[in-house]
Image (cartoon, helix red, strand yellow):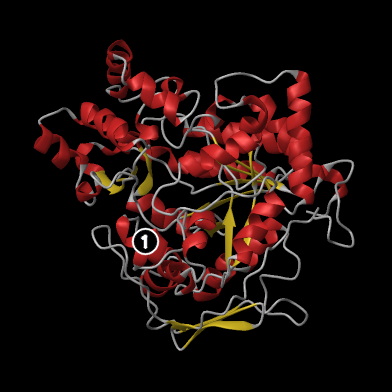
């Protein structure tokens, strides 16, 4: 239910890390999406590219997805339209609120993206500029997605200190819009918040019992991965990464930011760094070649080597790298991960890109979820720990997400459906990726067909470019496509 392969497919369309796990569909669009873009956004996208370089020649979501497929991909691709992408298209990256006219323009962009085939609206509310969107704005955009047969899916405004309040916001957006809603990478982050898991689940199940379609997805690890933008207040990040770094170079601003970074429980932003601590923060991705030797070290190690505080080290690294820097945070509970594995309304997403242990991908490290997330459902949790049965695992890896997305003729082995088929050995399927050595293929998946074409045969990629764009329900190419009067006009 969540991938970040729009970049990685530009370098290697085989998607081996996910293909070797039996993945057939990459769903993108967490807050930001491949379109719609303005000319200014196109230029910023190119300037902010990291290891993988490519021209951004498209403006619409449809054009962006087609550009990915035209590169030649083995897996299918789909996308939500990013709420932050729509916001930047109209408002830029500053902390501003839309006028009624601007909000109407944003809603039209959602309509266009839905008719391009978007699955709905995706948000990521701990990051600037997405965090600047208020509930009313998100509900308005989701209302458009809902009347176009789409859903709302969100990296919620908090996964820690305000977890329950953030859950209430997601449920309220679903209620007001009439659209289903899903929680991206379900978790309770930070030791102080682990005890909220039962109340978190109860909030969702109460909404479901009341008739709302609220679901979630998760990855099968107790560590997350994001950037150091989740380690400091969002006000300093307004205006984009260039403005953010410019502010951090100002001594007075730096003092203020350092003070806020040292707060365990800040009032209006999510401090992922404090939830994990310096020893629980692993550096995995730099833009600058000069800093890449630090890959695989913890923040604590680098801070000791430099003789600076962990917070100062974060700021120094961001300025030197010119990016948010990719890190892994150890902030979750294994017990809570296991508890979520037992919930029938939770599906799975890697929250990672489809890559390979070769070429450009070796310039950075990654989270092991890129190579092991899905086979852990089948091996570690179904076979070994009995957290769910094998049939339940298969359903939650296929039919459940296909149903939640409203896919046409996918997700089941059924006559007339697209032949997206996975063959695996339930006795041997195993993940091998670790946090120190994440770029290791899973084993036990032997054959994969995408749209009826073999893309993995006897555990080896065939190189077939079988992937295509998978469209949402309002896609203008469907016989019954297009948006309706309201979400009530769709069969959910």
| Depth check, front residue: 216 or 110 | 110
Q: Please tell me which residue is depicted at 85% across the width and 41% down the height of the picture.
A: 486
Relative height, residue 243 to residue 194 (above, below): above
Looking at the image, residue 484 sits to the left or right of residue 432; the answer is right
Residue 411: give x, y in percent of width and height.
66, 70
Task: Report the front residue among 370 and 213.
Answer: 370
Q: In the picture shown, does residue 218 fall above or below 154?
A: below
Instruction: Judge whether 291 appears above or below 349 on screen.
Output: above
Identify the residue at the far bottom of this view: 458
Question: Between residues 376 and 26, which one lies in front from this camera angle?
Answer: 26
Residue 118 seen by the camera: no
Going by the picture, which residue comes out furthest to the top? Answer: 252
Q: Which residue is depicted at the point 41% across and 21% down?
A: 236
* 330 to 250, vertically: above or below: below
Q: Residue 365 at x, y = what percent? A: 31, 56
In this rendering, position of residue 106 left or right of residue 76:
right
The x, y position of residue 264, in whole percent, is: 30, 25
Q: Residue at left 55%, top 22%?
A: 94
Residue that badge 1 annotates: 360
- Placement of the N terminus among the 4 image quadrants: bottom right
At x 64%, y 37%, the residue is 39
Task: Give x and y (percent) for residue 290.
Answer: 23, 44
Q: Is the residue marked by circle 1 packed among few (<14), some (14-19), or many (20+) residues within 10 Å?
A: some
């Amino acid at each position: 239910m969540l991938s970040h392969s729009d970049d990685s497919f530009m370098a290697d369309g085989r998607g081996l890390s996910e293909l070797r796990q039996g993945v057939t569909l990459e769903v993108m669009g967490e807050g930001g999406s491949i379109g719609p873009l303005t000319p200014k956004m196109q230029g910023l996208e190119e300037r902010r590219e990291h290891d993988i370089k490519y021209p951004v020649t498209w403006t619409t979501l449809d054009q962006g997805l087609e550009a990915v497929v035209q590169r030649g991909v083995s897996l299918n691709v789909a996308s939500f339209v990013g709420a932050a992408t729509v916001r930047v298209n109209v408002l830029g990256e500053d902390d501003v609120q839309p006028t009624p006219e601007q909000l109407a323009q944003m809603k039209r962009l959602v309509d266009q993206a839905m008719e391009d085939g978007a699955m709905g609206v995706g948000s990521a509310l701990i990051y600037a500029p997405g965090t600047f969107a208020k509930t009313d704005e998100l509900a308005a955009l989701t209302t458009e997605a809902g009347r176009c047969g789409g859903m709302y899916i969100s990296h919620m405004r908090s996964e820690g200190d305000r977890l329950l309040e953030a859950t209430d916001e997601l449920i309220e957006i679903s209620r007001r819009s009439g659209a289903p809603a899903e929680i991206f990478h379900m978790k309770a982050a930070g030791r102080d918040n682990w005890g909220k898991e039962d109340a978190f689940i109860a909030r969702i199940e109460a909404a479901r019992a009341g008739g709302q379609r609220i679901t979630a997805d998760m990855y099968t690890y107790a560590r997350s991965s994001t950037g150091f933008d989740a380690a400091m207040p969002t006000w300093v990040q307004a205006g984009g990464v260039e403005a953010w770094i410019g502010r951090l170079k100002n001594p007075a601003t730096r003092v203020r930011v350092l003070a806020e970074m040292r707060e365990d429980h800040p009032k209006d932003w999510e401090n992922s760094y404090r939830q994990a601590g310096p020893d629980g923060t692993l550096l995995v991705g730099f833009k600058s070649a000069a800093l890449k030797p630090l890959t695989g070290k913890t923040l604590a190690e680098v801070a000791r080597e430099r003789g600076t505080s962990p917070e100062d080290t974060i700021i120094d690294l961001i300025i030197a790298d010119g990016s948010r820097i990719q890190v892994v945070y150890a902030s979750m509970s294994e017990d809570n991960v296991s508890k979520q594995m037992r919930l029938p309304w939770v599906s799975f997403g890697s929250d990672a890109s489809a890559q390979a242990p070769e070429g450009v991908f070796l310039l950075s490290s990654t989270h092991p979820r890129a190579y092991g997330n899905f086979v852990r459902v089948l091996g570690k949790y179904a076979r070994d720990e009995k957290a769910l049965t094998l049939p339940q695992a298969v359903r939650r890896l296929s039919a459940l997400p296909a149903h939640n997305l409203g896919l046409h003729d996918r997700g089941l082995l059924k006559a007339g459906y697209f032949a997206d088929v996975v063959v695996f050995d339930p006795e041997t399927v195993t993940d091998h990726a670790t946090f120190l050595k994440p770029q290791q293929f899973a084993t036990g998946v032997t054959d994969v067909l995408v749209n009826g074409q073999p893309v993995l045969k006897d555990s080896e990629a065939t190189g077939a470019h079988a992937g295509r764009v998978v469209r949402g329900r309002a896609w203008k190419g469907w016989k019954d496509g297009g948006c309706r009067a309201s979400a009530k006009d769709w069969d959910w």
